[in-house]
Image (spheres, grey):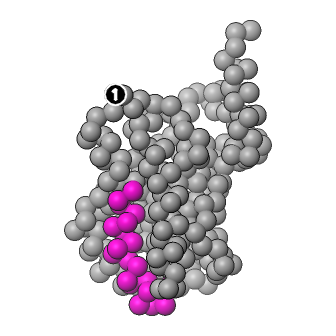
Amino acid sequence: MSSGTAVVTGAAQGIGRAVSERLQAAGYEVLALDVNAEALAGLAGDLGCRTAVIDVSDADAVAAVADLAPDASVLVNNAAIQVYKDLLSSTVAEMRALCDINIIGPVLMAQALVPVMAERGGGSIVNLSSITSVAHAASTSLYPTTKAAINLLTQAMAVEFADRGIRCNAVAPGTVLTEGTAGHYGTPAAQQAIASTLLAGRMGRPTDIADAICFLCSDEASWITGQVLFVDGGFTASQGQYFRAARKMAMPS
């Protein structure tokens, strides 16, 4: 049975909610953080976990999380935003928001909780990356760039926090169907077409990502740090197959 508090950002829905449920089932007390107060209240009602409305780009608000989780042993940096725009039309405000939330947010969370985790003997941090960190998706502004930064940030955290007994890894999800991504992936028929290009034969579920994160937080992963685990149904292993299938679907019959 796991002990201590697991702090999960972007916890109210989708992957964050699945992670919160999985970590609570593993024995952690969960502190769920999100900017969506309504969805967060729903999560609290379903799980009975502690919650706080937090914007991870707000340095003062994030610093206060240490007081909310004085026994933190796990940090999952899941909060992120996407901007569906091409680079040339992306505004400065949009690009700054992507960097503030997707990159600086995880650093602020680490600054708040690493001293707490070190004080109790160590812990585990898992950052959320993406397959777009190695395979850029069009019309997503700087989002893929921020996720590539997360891969390097994960290594930096692993190196800098090792002497505090803290491991740091990242999970890079593939095409996972959530409330937030369903519209982006189109109709059920379009989603099935995407699924047919993947080695696993289906699109991902939030629970697929949550299971991987829970493993990386566990003692079974005690010799794993500084790694990016791609949980993508085989996408990164077979990008050629994916693009051949996409080209075939795009060709007129």
Residue 99 visible, this angle? yes
**Residue interval drawn in magenta:** 103-128
Answer whether residue 113 is magenta in the image: yes
Which residue is at 76% across, 34% downward?
Answer: 241
Up-down relation of residue 17 to residue 24 (above or below): above
Which image quarter is the C terminus in?
top right
Q: Is residue 1 above or below residue 36?
A: below
Q: Nearer the viewer, residue 214 or 235?
A: 235
Q: Which residue is denoted by mark 1 in the rendering?
A: 89
Place of residue 195 in the rendered image (x, y in percent of width and height, measured from the top left): 70, 37
| Three-letter amino acid code at the position of disc 1 | Ser
Kindly indicate the quadrant of the structure image that contains residue 201: top right
Relative placement, left or right, of 50 versus 170 is: left
Q: How many marks?
A: 1
* Residue 142 on image: x %, y %: 41, 41
Which one is in front, 152 or 217? 152
Q: Secondary structure at mark 1?
A: helix
Q: Is residue 28 visible?
A: no
Q: Residue at x 39, y 47 (%)?
A: 81
- Residue lying at 51% horizontally and 40% vertically, measured from the top left: 181
Badge 1: few (under 14), some or many (20 or more) residues near its Cα, within 10 Å?
Answer: few
Say if the magenta span includes residue 191: no
Toward the top, the furthest residue is: 253
In what quadrant of the picture does the N terminus appear?
bottom right
Secondary structure mostly seen in magenta is: helix
Q: Depth check: 225 or 25 in front?
A: 225
Left or right of 163: which side holds 239? right
- Left or right: 7 as drawn, with respect to 99: right
> Is 83 in front, or is 146?
146
Q: Which residue is farthest left?
A: 60
Q: Residue at x 51, y 65 (%)?
A: 154
